[in-house]
Amino acid sequence: MSVRTLPLLFLNLGGEMLYILDQRLRAQNVPGDKARKVLNDIISTMFNRKFMEELFKPQELYSKKALRTVYDRLAHASIIRLNQASMDKLYDLMTVAFKYQVLMCPRPKDVLLVTFNHLDAIKGFIRDSPTILRQVDETFRQLTEVYGGLSAGEFQLIRQTLLIFFQDLHIRVSIFLKDRVQNSNGRFVLPVSGPVPWGTEVPGLIRMFNNKGEEVKTVEFKHGGNYVPAPKEGSFELYGDRVLKLGTNMYSVNRPVETHMSGASENLASRTQESIAPNPLAKEELNFLARLLGGMEIKKPSDPEPGFRLNLFTTDEEEEQAALTRPEELSYEVINIQATQDQQRNEELARIMGEFEISDPPRRSASKGDDLLAMMDELSLC
Amino acid sequence: MVAADSAGPEDPGVRMFRRESSIPLRCSAAALCNNLSVLPLPVRNLTHFGVVHGPSAQLLSAAPEGVPLAQRQLHAKGGAGVSPPLITQVHWCVLPFRVLLVLTSHRGIQMYESDGSVMVYWHALGSGDASPVQAVFARGIAASGHFICVGTWSGRVLVFDIPAKGPNVVLSEELAGHQTPVTDIATELAQGQDCMADVVTADDSGLLCVWRSGPEFKLLTQIPGFGVPCPSVQLWQGTVAAGYGNGQVRLYEASTGILHVQINAHARALCALDLAPEVGKLLSAAEDTFVHIWKLSRSPESGSIEVEHCHGECVPDTQVCGARFCDPSGSSFAVTGYDLAEILRFSSV
C-alpha cells in the first residue's frame, strides 16, 4: 500500500502517547519540573533530525508489534519506567485513539489535519524549549513538503493503509464508551448527522441536465441522515485553525485514562493462527527496527536523576491484575523469529544495542540479533 | 436496520428490502473500495462471494439461507518484501465460455478457475519507471467478450486475451488513457452497433475513459474529473454511472461524455456501485453507512437518462467497503464493511 504512511502513523501515535503520559504524570502528582523534563526528553528524541530522516524515507508499514518496540524505546528515552502491563495499556490506548481518528476523518486528506492537531499540542508541551520547538517545526515543514502536494487519491491510499494496519483491533476504551463513540463490542459509532466533509454537498438532491448542459429538473430525495454543510476547511498552514477536533487532547484530570480489555473473540481463531505461524519476514522487521531506532539518539546515563515508575493504572494491584488477565491474543510478548541465529547482523544493530539503557541485563544474549529480540520481549519488563 | 426512505410516492411507508441472516467470514473485510464480488449460480441455487481481508482473500459459496458451504482462502503471490503483499481486489469475470476469478495485488495479477482451486495465469507487475514513493499495484477488473481488462497503478490498463480453455492467456494490449492509478473498470455487452462504447475505465483523479473493445481497443471519449477520485464505475445501455470520493453519483452519456444526472447521493466517499442490468437498477454504497438503490430510465420525450430514488438502507456503524446485487433483477443485495467479519444480506420484501 502507500509507502508514505509511516510518518503519519508514527507522529499521531506519538502524540497520543504524550497526551496519556502527560495525564498520568499529573495523576501521579509528579512535580511540574520533573514532568516537563520527561515530556521534553521524549519529544526531543521523537523529533530528532536523524530519526525523522529515517522515518520520512518511503517504506512499508511494519507489524503492530515491531512498532510497539519503537514506542517502548521512546517512552524510556526519559527517566520514567513503565512495566509490561502499563506499556501494553499505553500502546492499546494510543492505537485505539488513532484508529478512531483515522476512521472518523471526513476526507482522507484530513488525516493531515489530525497530525497537525497532535503537533500543535506537542508544541504546547514544550513551549518553553525553543530548541525542541524548532525540531517540531522542522518536522512540520517536512510534512507540508511531502504531503502538501499529494492528490486525494494518494491520501485515500494512505488512509486505506492505516485502516488495514488497525484492522481487527477492537479494544474497548472507557473514555470512548462514556462519550458514546464506541459500542460495547469495541466497534466505533459512525454518526449519520453533523457537517459533511469539505467539498461534499449535503445529500438529498438529484439534478438532471439536457444535451446542452442546461438543468431541466431537480428532485429531492430523503437520504436518511441529518447532515449540514461543512463550515470551512481546516488550515494546513503552520499556524491556523484546524477546524477538525480529531487528534486534540481528549484527556483531562476529570477524564482519566482507563481501558477495558476485550478479547477480539470474533476473530480469535484467525488471529491465533497468525501468531503461531512462524513469520519469515521478521528479519526484515529487525532491519527496519535497527534503522529506525538507530536514528533515535538516547542520552547516555550521565543524568544523575533517578528514574521513576509511571503506572497507567490507578493502583499497583490493578496493574498486576491486568498483566495476569491480558487476553493472550493481545499479547506482544511472544515473537516467533526464525532468523535469530543469523550472525551477520549489521554494525548498526550492534551500535544500537550498545546504547540501550535497560536496567536489568537481558536474559539471553547469544548474538546481537538476539539482543534486539530480547529487547522486544523484555524491555518493558524492566 | 433503519429504512432511510421508503418506496416512491405511490407506496409510502413500505419497506422494500429486509435484512436476511448474514454470512460469517473467517476474516474481516479490508477498507478497500469494491471489496465484494458476487457470482450468482442460479442453476445450483448457490451464490459465490469474494472478499479481501488484506494479505488474503476469502471465497465462499452460500445457499439461499446464507449458510456457507465451501470456503477457500487465497493469498497474493510474490512474497518478497517486508510484509506479505496486500490484495487489492477479487472479481469474477464471466466470459463467453468460462468464468475466471481474478485477484489483483501489490505484486501482480492472478487468474484462477472460478472456484479458486487452480491458478491458470500469473502476471507479475514490474515497477518499471516507478519512483520509490509510488505504490505499485493492480486494481480494477472487468471482462469484455473474451478479454479481461485489469487496471494498474501507472494508469495503464492491461488487456488479456483469454482462451476458451486452458492457461494460454496472452497480454494483447496495454491501454494508455490514464495518468493516475486506475480504480475500477466497467463493461457491458456490445449490442452489435458500430461505435458502441462497451468499456469504461476510471482513475484516482476522477477521469473516465470510454472505450470500444475489439482486437484493438479504441478510445472513444474522455470525461474529465474534478479533483476527487472515482472509485467505482458502471455501464448500462450506453450510460456511464460514476461514483465519486465526494459522495456524488453522476450519469453520463457514454458516447459523448455529456453529463445528464448529478446526484448528491452520500455524505462520505462512494465505495461501490453496482447494476442490475435486467431492470436498470443502480446501487450506490458509501462510507456514510448508507446503501441507496436508484432506478434508471430514459425519458420518453427527450431520450435522455433520468433517475429516481427507490430505497435507502442504513447499515449502522459500518463503514461500507463493498456492495453488490446478488441477482440480475436486483431483488437482493449484499454488503461488506471495514473490520466486519460477515457479509450482510438484504432481499426485497
Image: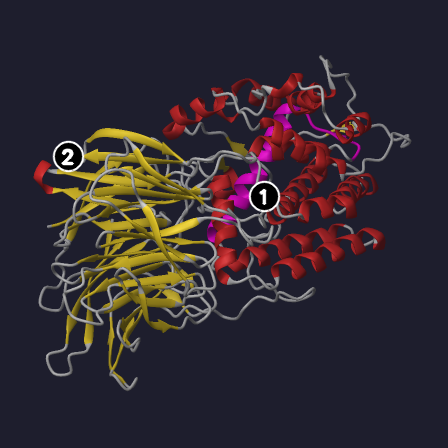
Percent from the top left, x then y, of residue B272? 32, 55
Q: CA distance from mark 2 to mark 1?
A: 49 Å
The range drawn in magenta is A78-104
Please report, as a chain letter, where disc 2 is located: B
Q: Crowding near pointer 1: few (<14 within 10 Å), some, many (20+)?
A: few
Which corner quadrant of the image does residue B239 belong to? bottom left
Tell me if B63 is positioned left or right of B120 in this view. left
Closer mark to the observer between disc 2 and disc 1: 2
The answer to whether residue A98 is magenta is yes
**Local SS, label 2:** loop
Disc 2: which residue: B63
User: Is residue A314 visible in this depiction of the protein?
Assistant: no
Which corner quadrant of the image does residue B265 belong to? bottom left
Which corner quadrant of the image does residue B271 belong to? bottom left
Q: Closer to the camera, B195 or B25?
A: B195
Q: Closer to the camera, B156 or B309?
A: B156
Amino acid type shown at disc 2: Ala
